[in-house]
Image (spheres, grey):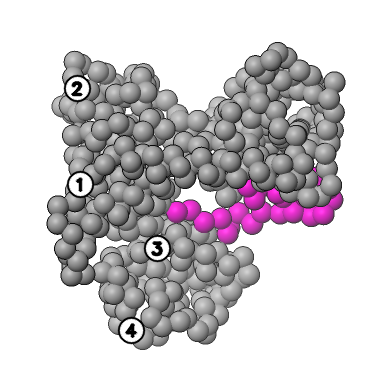
Amino acid sequence: MKQHDLIVIGAGPAGYTGAIRAAQLGMDVACIEKENALGGTCLRVGCIPSKALLESSELFAEASHGFKRHGIDVGEVKLDLPKMLKQKQRTVDALTKGVGSLFTKNEITRYTGQAKLNGSGQILLDAADGEQELKAKHILIATGSKPAKLPGIECDTDRIGTSADALSYDEVPERLVVIGAGYIGLEIGTIWRRLGSQVTVLEYLDRILPGMDTELAEEACKIFKKQGLQFRFNSQVTGARVAGDRCVVECEEADPIECDRVLVAVGRVPNTEGLNLQSVGVTTDKGGRVSVDERYQTSASGLYAVGDVIRGPQLAHKAADEAVACVEQISDVGGKVNYDAIPGVVYTNPEIASVGQSENALQHAGIEYRKGKFPFLPNGRARALAQTEGFIKILADAVTDRVLGVQIIGPRAGELIAEAVIAIEMGATSEDIARCSHAHPTLSEVYKDASLAVTGRAVNI
């Protein structure tokens, strides 16, 4: 029986990051991944391929419609979808190989196969060449999540499918129905809208981006409608089926919708099936999540869990931070995650980003705050980019002035949010941000104006 100090189950952002950090701390580390390629859902069929297509589709849209306003006429722009998909795959392949190189560099033992707990500190590995027993003092579950199912809908991976399927369509669907107005549905929906699809988004609630700041979501919805996305809110989908050369999506109290393809994007659920958790007395909640303490330890000694399989937002960077904190605590060198400083980004155009408390959450908690909001419209760099939609909003404690939350919708919001993350992590006030020099002309100047607006001192409006 092969023995290690730590065995990590799953080689996604949490798994490979935690494994590398543990190796740096001197542990004998192994990582089990059931797929041949490393990187997990995020790298192989989620975050990275979607961002590759978002970037490519945005370049296509700019060449088709946006270049002319800059005085660039390229004539008729043609889409070569197979080449675009190859570019996406090249990006994924390079990064998966990179994870493999990091494993080699850090002397991490890699196992390929399905891992199943086999009692305390033991794992039964079902690999292509047979079963193998492994043992470790510490085991870390980092198996991530998978697309949630919707009753009444069977995904066939071709005409009716999940996000992974929708990132590999071999042709642009004339009509695409997206079920779910969360970040996955909106990102993928905008990809195909830019490439020529008529996209209809069906959402059970009365708004897009559930859980995000309402003012932010309302502004985003207005912009997406101008871009051509169609929304149907308060839509309870009861079924979807293939009928000849088309798909039919059925909704309660509404006419069926005909389309060419259907994307089911109603969230994700923890990937804990098949782990044999009951062999060590660990149970999951109704959502399939594993309960852990502040050290990420489950109810079983030596068994830990991080990322999408535990409570909290299902974000790759959150999962990776938890994995690092977990193995550092195992090694008694500290390690902690500040959940108030975990950013979230929606990579549409414009991008949407937030960190800390939303205005809704502060109101619900009865916390008194001051609000500073400033648009991108007057900003010189935004004007030069011809990307002036959106704003930055800063929420600060009414008494201490500490920054409690920041919301952004606008150009490069995913990069701009980093300043807000640091501000919250370091306990900065809106006055601290206002007193910092921001280079001119840059988009970051909108931060300065938003922070000045907290006390009614914004200059450029």
Q: Residues within 10 Å of mark 2 (few under 14, many from 20)?
A: some
Residue closest to the eye, 461 or 100: 100
SS under mark 2: strand
The disc placed on residue 412 is 3
The disc placed on residue 137 is none
The magenta stretch is 319-345
Q: CA distance from mark 1 to mark 4?
A: 41 Å
Residue 367 visible in the picture: no
Give the residue number, with chain letter if any, for mark 1.
78
Q: Amino acid at mark 1?
A: Lys
SS under mark 1: loop
Q: Residues within 10 Å of mark 1 (few under 14, many from 20)?
A: few
Q: CA distance from mark 2 to mark 4?
A: 52 Å
Q: CA distance from mark 2 to mark 3?
A: 37 Å
Residue at horizontal 30 percent and vertical 48 percent from the top: 57
Q: Earlier in the sequence, mark 2 or mark 4?
A: 2
Residue 349 position in % (x across, y down): 32, 56
